[in-house]
């Protein structure tokens, strides 16, 4: 054994007598090793020779997991970092994620840092693009449900819309003028078409069909041919209202969005708002069983159920002329067969 090796052995024995271990694997915790230097352990060795895993930080002796809202996406981290406002930590081993449109990320730290999840925008607020710390309030005259990327104009309003990112941003909203209407996501107003009337109802306004006519909106597929919002700009006129006259044998009360077939023993001419009884019958008109249909963002255009028309045969001892709304009793002492249409049938 040469002199160098003898000196090393003596040094090891001396350290053992002093109670110092030459190697202390427990010093850096279960995932690292350290080197003893007269009873002290070097942090640098723990962090470089046996680095901490991602998702943890190392104090030189052990790994400590990152707390919610913090992350360490590299090895040898000496601390976990807070997610900045508008970001959240879904995986502590990865970089923070931007809050997606319709959501926000705000943690308990300064400037909303330290979020561990994103939160949907509340009703009445929106977030058009990623990375919001807080959602924006909808402009006056518009509204939204939870988690919305934009706000929708309220009935009786139209709003400016701007294409931003892959969605829309909502600008100023304006009340619709008398004699005009707007529909959901309209950035302009349009005049009421012929055979409709401008009506204010329940705080909103719209164009409603006149008696003898019914109104329908274009289908979504048709509306998409003239409504768009993209990098070329937003062109969102109100969805077209189509007004049609009720056909013969049908009727359409005011504010209808469909025509309805006349019941048996009655008839109608084109453009009728009700049906006329045949001779020997009488027809009564009930009350509408609903209210004006109001789709959010669209004008009220329809009655849910029209006033029902019921036709009955004149009973014996009575008569009913064509168009009658009630039967008439024969003069005293006279009678008539059922279905009579004239007083001359009373004998």
Image (cartoon, rainbow, N blue to C red):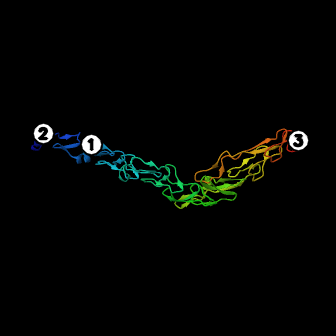
Circle 1 packing at 10 Å, graded few (<14), some (14-19), many (20+), is many
Q: 253 or 66, which lies in front? A: 253
SS label for mark 2: loop
Q: Can you identify the residue that label 3 sits on?
A: 346
Between 224 and 2, the one lying in front of the other is 224
Q: Residue 198, relative to residue 92: is it above or below?
A: below
Badge number at residue 118: none
Q: Which image quarter holds the C terminus? A: top right
- Disc 1 or disc 3, which is closer to the eye? 3
Q: Earlier in the sequence, mark 3 or mark 2?
A: 2
From this viewpoint, which residue is outermost toward the right? 347
Q: Which residue is mark 2?
A: 18
Residue 286: percent from the left, percent from the top? 72, 45
Q: Which numbered disc flags the more N-terminal residue, 1 or 3?
A: 1
Which structural element holds mark 3? loop
Task: For label 3, count other residues whose C-alpha is less than 10 Å away and answer few (under 14), some (14-19) or many (20+).
Answer: many
Which image quadrant for residue 264?
A: top right
Residue position for label 1:
62
Calculate the distance from the C-alpha at mark 3 to the C-alpha at mark 2. 136 Å
Q: Is residue 330 left or right of residue 196?
A: right
Q: Is residue 246 above or below residue 1?
A: below
- Callouts 3 and 2 close, C-beta under 8 Å: no
| x, y percent for residue 52 | 29, 45
Real-space Cα distance between discs 2 and 1? 25 Å
Position of residue 126 in the picture relative to residue 223 (left or right):
left
């Amino acid at each position: 054994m040469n002199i160098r090796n003898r000196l090393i052995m003596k040094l090891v024995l001396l350290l053992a007598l002093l109670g110092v271990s030459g190697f202390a694997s427990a010093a850096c915790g279960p995932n690292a090793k350290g080197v003893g230097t007269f009873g002290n352990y070097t942090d640098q060795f723990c962090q470089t020779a046996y680095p901490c895993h991602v998702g943890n930080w190392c104090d030189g002796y052990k790994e400590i997991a990152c707390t919610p809202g913090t992350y360490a996406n590299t090895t040898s981290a000496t601390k976990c970092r807070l997610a900045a406002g508008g970001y959240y930590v879904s995986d502590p081993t990865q970089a923070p994620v931007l809050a997606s449109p319709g959501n926000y990320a705000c943690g308990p730290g300064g400037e909303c840092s330290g979020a561990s999840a994103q939160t949907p925008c509340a009703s009445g607020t929106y977030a058009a693009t990623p990375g919001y710390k807080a959602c924006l309030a909808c402009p006056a005259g518009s509204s939204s449900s939870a988690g919305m990327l934009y706000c929708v104009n309220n009935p009786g309003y139209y709003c400016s819309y701007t294409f931003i990112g892959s969605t829309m941003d909502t600008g100023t909203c304006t009340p619709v003028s008398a004699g005009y209407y707007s529909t959901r996501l309209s950035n302009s107003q349009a005049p009421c078409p012929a055979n409709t009337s401008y009506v204010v109802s329940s705080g909103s306004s719209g164009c409603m069909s006149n008696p003898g006519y019914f109104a329908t909106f274009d289908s979504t597929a048709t509306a998409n041919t003239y409504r768009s919002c993209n990098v070329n700009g937003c062109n969102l006129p109100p969805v077209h209202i189509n007004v049609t006259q009720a056909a013969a044998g049908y009727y359409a009360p005011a504010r209808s969005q469909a025509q309805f077939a006349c019941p048996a023993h009655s008839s109608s001419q084109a453009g009728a708002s009700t049906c006329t009884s045949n001779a020997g019958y009488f027809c009564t008109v009930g009350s509408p069983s609903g209210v004006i249909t109001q789709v959010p963002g669209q004008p009220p255009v329809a009655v849910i159920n029209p006033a029902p028309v019921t036709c009955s045969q004149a009973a014996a001892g009575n008569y009913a002329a064509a168009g009658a709304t009630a039967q008439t009793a024969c003069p005293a002492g006279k009678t008539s067969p059922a279905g009579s249409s004239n007083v001359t049938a009373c004998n």
